[in-house]
Amino acid sequence: MDIKEFLDQDQKKDLLRLLSAGSVDDGKSTLIGRLLFDSKKLYEDQLVALKRDSKREGHAGGDIDYALLLDGLKAEREQGITIDVAYRYFSTAKRKFIIADTPGHEQYTRNMVTGASTANLAIILIDARKGVITQTRRHTFLVSLLGIKHVVLAVNKMDLMDYSQEVYDNICRDYREFVTPLAIPDVRFFPISALKGDNVVDLSDNMPWYHGKSVLEFLESVHITSDRNFTDLRYPVQYVVRPGLDYRGFAGEVASGIIRKGDEIMVLPSRKTSKVKEIITYDGNPDYAFPPQSVTITLEDEIDVSRGDMLVHPNNLPKMERHFEAMLVWMDEEPMKQGTQFFIKHTSQSTKARIDLVRHLVDINTLEKKDPSNFGLNEIGRVVITTVKPLYFDAYKKNRQTGSFIFIDPVTHNTVAVGMIIDKLSSDELPSRIVDVDKEKIANGVGLISKSEFENSYQQKGSTIWITGLHGSGKNELAYTLQRSLFDMGAKVMLLDGKSVRFGLSRELDFSPTDRAEHMRRVAHLCKLMNDQGVLVICSFLSPDESIRDQVKEIIGIENFSLIYMDADIDFCRKNDQYSIYAKADEGKLKYLPGVDMDYHVPKQASLVLDSIEKEINLEKALFYIAENKIYPM
Amino acid sequence: MKSPSYSINNLRELEAESIHIIREVAAEFENPVMLYSIGKDSSVMVRLAEKAFYPGKVPFPLMHIDSKWKFGEMIDFREEYTKDNGWNLIVHYNKEGFESGIGPYTHGSKVHTDVMKTQALLAGLEKYKFDAAFGGARRDEEKSRAKERIYSFRDKFHQWDPKNQRPELWNIFNAKVHKGESIRVFPISNWTELDIWQYIRLEKIPIVPLYYAKMRPIVEVDGSLILVDDDRMPKELRDKAKMKMVRFRTLGCYPLTGAIESEADTIEKIVEEMMTVTVSERTTRVIDFDQEASMEQKKREGYF
């Protein structure tokens, strides 16, 4: 064969993407190193560099340490562990391969999920000395979760077990028992020694009882084309190409199904229909396109199509919902916070989403359900999600492309979680946007948003600042300027004073002690409602009676209540009396005015006492108090 | 019934993946740019961009960071290719560095690379406020690149923090950045050197003739075969030049890029040589030897 023939043949090969899972101890790096080495893809100078590195940092004595081939980054080499997904490439006469190499340690679910997301096949390594262990189960579960259809179970280190068939058979039996319920369509078993090369590339003489293929032979021959979904046409529009005024081409990758010239298609979400006029590529216009081809489509009719829309066959529609259930893997160091509005990216569409309910988390070691309260890094949970715009999706099991999505944090912009949509219940049957727990809350009049959610969102304490003092002591002046200042800083702050509340809410009440008490009770409950929803309330009320102020404090809650006393002598107040209230009271035209015909109880335990004469600095003092007590900002 | 018509070969699969990535970037970023090194990988990337938006025009410019020490043939090729294919080309160089005469012979490879390549690149990105920059790096090129993301996140200082990279799953890419932050995008991450050559052959993509073997004036400097490209090479070196049949496996600044002795004057011969030869690609670039893990170091600093 000359080089031209070689190249022509090489072009025809297909590509297999595989994931390798296992820890360094299982000999995973050795296996990959050998696949790469034995497929003659290692250039000599890499080997030279390797020998040099082995001397300095190697963990394998005098031999070549295959793991060093694989660990790319300096920091990791120093730690001696791989902490991220590394991609390797090799090629044989029959096929090309991309290996996503992921570390197997417990804390690295994140990496394995990443590597698995693009893989056709997974190699799971078992140490023949240890058999099926927790880690094996974990890896297998993740492989099935990410929808990988082919598993190579490589029982490694057979050389250390005298190449015993019995050992191998027992391990296979244990594994089969465990893997069957996970419904992975194709699971194959291989007894190997990565170190010695048994059954990796060539069949081994050491295990004459084994009659199957070597690992590499299997990798070269496993059929993967039919793993793609050729049934359900899903064409998410990625980009609109407009070379001229009259021309609009819709560029995208065929996510699944076949799209043919002349096909009747429907555009989602508009549901307008048209026919495929042309399938356009740089290399000519084919009659049909299939996954994963990237093409450009033109339509017979001029209809509005933009990025995020999806072309489908009208008789085969995806689900179009704002509400669905998914398995979510948490990828971020910061745990999930309920109530956050995330960005969600799904096919070529982006919108916002929130998690309504975490049904349960999965203990990936036992596969049992566990308490959903702490949804942090590497945890997997079953969740109910609501999005702002509808998504056009299929269950992940049926369609990897339209069943997967990522969550992006609105503040850090990190990819914080990834999800796979479950085809279980229709949207109506799902715990609706109002979930079961919520129904109970609604029945009891408890809001669906907790006080702490409000507070986190507003970055303030839902708290009441109650200002008391004689008429004319400058309460309102302080209250109004305080609200202005806090509002300008970004606080959600409400103001209540005698005038505004008596205008409507307490309209029928007068100034008698009984009515004053009722008036205060109403105000206190109003404050509590506001505080519970994260709102800061400033109250400016004369409130002369100590026992009533105590009742107010009790209703609002002692931890949310700050009392500011405006300390002013009666002469100051009389001078400051713009409406001549004191004069009217003196003349007997007005009853129940503290300081004239009623007592004012000076508060025994005010949070802050301000001297009315020092007007200018009282606002500063109040703001300082609010900041110091982390009322605003929190 | 057999359905061979729905199977896709490896090159077409890689092509489709790259086009998908390039379109995502064009759709989601405000101001992307494609970094153009004039090398073979860049040439493939540029063709993929042309394909992605066909029959429309590519909606972003090309930017070449000119260190002013590139092979003359590279500059000729750049001018011709971009003109013929209607590209909007930005050529950016470090004016101060150039005027103060920075060069590998006077300042050494480290200073030259830092000032004329890394700093020039960062200044170029800064100047035009690009929020995404395509690069033609491949994961199989070098160990430290095996873990690189396709969307590689860079902070305000264009620095790369290996511990602070976003998870990347399926073909869903996170394009959210704050003002000043950016993404380096590597659409041909999954291509190998052989894939690149195969694709160039299949698509008849023009490449700089330096890749093909020819008799050229060569000086041996510390074991590297350096081409006498212009008379900025010190005279005492130039005087030692001998004609040799050589070609280049990678292209860069001519004093820092070694040739290999070769007879390969066609793509087929290059591939044949590559499959049997025992020196991996990047080792002909002098900068890699500066220090252990030097590529990784340079990447952290913002040079790819």
Image (tube, helix red, strand yellow):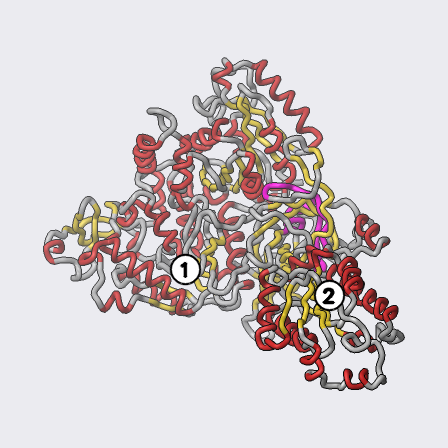
In this rendered view, identify the residue nearer to me: A13 or A306: A306
User: Residue reaching furthest right?
Assistant: A508
Mark 2 touches mark 1? (CB < 8 Å): no
Q: Is residue A388 magenta?
A: yes
Where is B182 relative to A330, above or below?
below
Q: Residues within 10 Å of mark 2 (few under 14, many from 20)?
A: few
Q: Which mark is residue A523?
A: none
Rendering coords of residue A177 (x, y %):
68, 24
- The local secondary structure at tag 2 comes to loop
Q: Is residue A221 left or right of residue A91?
A: right
Amino acid type at image mark 1? Phe
Q: Residues within 10 Å of mark 1 (few under 14, many from 20)?
A: few
The quadrant of the image that shows the C terminus of chain B is bottom left
Where is A403 relative to A92, above or below?
below
- The local secondary structure at tag 1 comes to loop
Q: Is residue A306 left or right of residue A87?
A: right
Tags 2 and 1 on a common chain: no
Residue at image coords 68%, 40%:
A361
Residue at image coords 27%, 47%:
B290
Residue at image coords 49%, 48%:
B11
Where is B177 relative to A72, above or below?
below
Rendering coords of residue A578 (x, y %):
72, 85
Query: Which chain hosts label 1?
Result: B
Query: Which segment is the magenta one?
Result: A377-405
Alpha-carbon span between mark 2 and mark 1? 43 Å
Amino acid type at image mark 2? Ser
Q: Which residue is mark 1?
A: B157
Q: Which residue is mark 2?
A: A270
